[in-house]
Amino acid sequence: MFDVQKVRAQFPILSQTVNGKPLVYFDNGATAQKPQVVIDAISKYYSEINANIHRGVHTLSQLATDAYEVSRNTIQTHLNAKYPHEIIFTSGTTQGINLVANGFAAIVKSGDEVMVSALEHHSNIVPWQFLCEKTGAKLVVIPMNDKGELILSEYERLLSDKTKIVAVNHISNALGTVNPVKYIIAKAHKVGAAVLIDGAQATPHLRPDVQDLDCDFYVFSGHKVCGPTGVGILYGKESWLNQLPPYMGGGEMIKEVTFEKTTYADLPHKFEAGTPNIAGGIVLGTAIDYLNEIGFDNIAKYEQELLDYGTKRLLEIEGITIYGTGENKASVISFNIEGIHPYDIGTIIDKLGVAVRTGHHCAQPIMNYFNIPGTIRASFAFYNTKEEIDIFVEAVKKAQLMLS
Ligand SMILES: *Cc1c(COP(=O)(O)O)cnc(C)c1O
């Protein structure tokens, strides 16, 4: 049975006070808090086995290498990838997307098309713009409707044999929309396009099955799944990873180096130049194990309750507009209150101990679509409670009174 109080007791930060009030942390879309097992695993790594991986014959180096590879296997199993070498450690979602977009410069030609959606985070827009600038390809955008859902009929109309890659998020960080990625992938494959799924916002809420989705690439960040910052994962199908050129040159990614010619290491090392975030990589496995122990079915069910309750309570507030009202949503509520700047609400409720994000959430095109400067975003995790939602709603009401 899922017991939220038991879960909360595993997160030391949640018992803090902020500005003299109990912390209500609703900024999980930006980064998740860390359970004690993750904090302990970081300390254990540096206290007991710190050494560089893949280089030494000495015992600590072997222990560190083994732990790093165990984590790779954990993530392979978690994503249901076919091979462990399809799992590339990166510094995060942003680097994973840049790695793939950079590699596609060897594939995309002038006149080809690269497709993103109206719902993307800047890190799933800008690297593709770089690619288009470099190659002369055209950036094509799948539009969305007023509910914040992608318009699939338009998507299908825009697809053609010019489309080389489609890059969309699994869940929108700004609105919470869950995109029908399996459908999007199948349609793209019909025209021979590859698909990259930005799973940064999905992986805290669900367990993706990359073989079932049949995506070509799937990226996410450690810090949003209760793991450390500075580490993330790029999953890529073996055939694609073999085809793409390396992203960074350096140590660990080569077979043989002469001044005339360098040959590259096999997967996954070809994409893992230099000393990585070793502790981060190992502890990401700890975080994924932790989430699987709680169980993604429990997480999804409980977060849906929080979403329903939070939506219902917020709608009591006069003058509120919720952005992102699609059928299929994660536990993210983006909203504004008539006549009040989102930043002002965020500042006042912080004084009351409530942490939310305000602004454009790295998704300015979405804000432009709604013609707003930004929103207030409350994003719930499995360790949040309905009591916290009550505190948050009362704080927003208080701020509204003060500001109007
Ligand atoms: C957070 C986020 C990113 C960027 O992740 P980083 O950890 O900053 O690299 C990209 N896309 C989405 C949907 C996100 O939520």
Image (cartoon, helix red, strand yellow):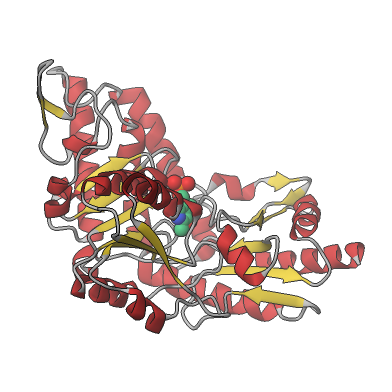
The image quarter in which residue 279 lies = top left
Q: Which residue is drawn at the image coordinates 18% and 58% (left, top)?
A: 81
- Residue 322 can be seen, yes or no: yes
Name the side, left or right, on which 189 lies relative to 169.
left
Q: Which residue is drawn at the image coordinates 73% and 65% (left, top)?
A: 391
Where in the figure is residue 82, as x and y percent of width and height? 13, 58
Name the side, left or right, on which 339 lies relative to 269.
right
Q: Which residue is drawn at the image coordinates 66% and 75% (left, top)?
A: 322
- Quadrant where the C terminus is found in the figure: bottom right
- Residue 112, placed above or below residue 310: above
- Residue 132, placed above or below residue 50: below
Where in the figure is residue 328, as x and y percent of width and height? 46, 79
Q: Nearer the viewer, residue 373 or 10?
A: 373
- Quadrant where the N terminus is found in the figure: bottom left
Q: Nearer the viewer, residue 227 or 246?
A: 246
Where in the figure is residue 364, as x and y percent of width and height? 59, 58
- Residue 15, placed above or below residue 143: above
Q: Nearer the viewer, residue 344 or 125?
A: 125
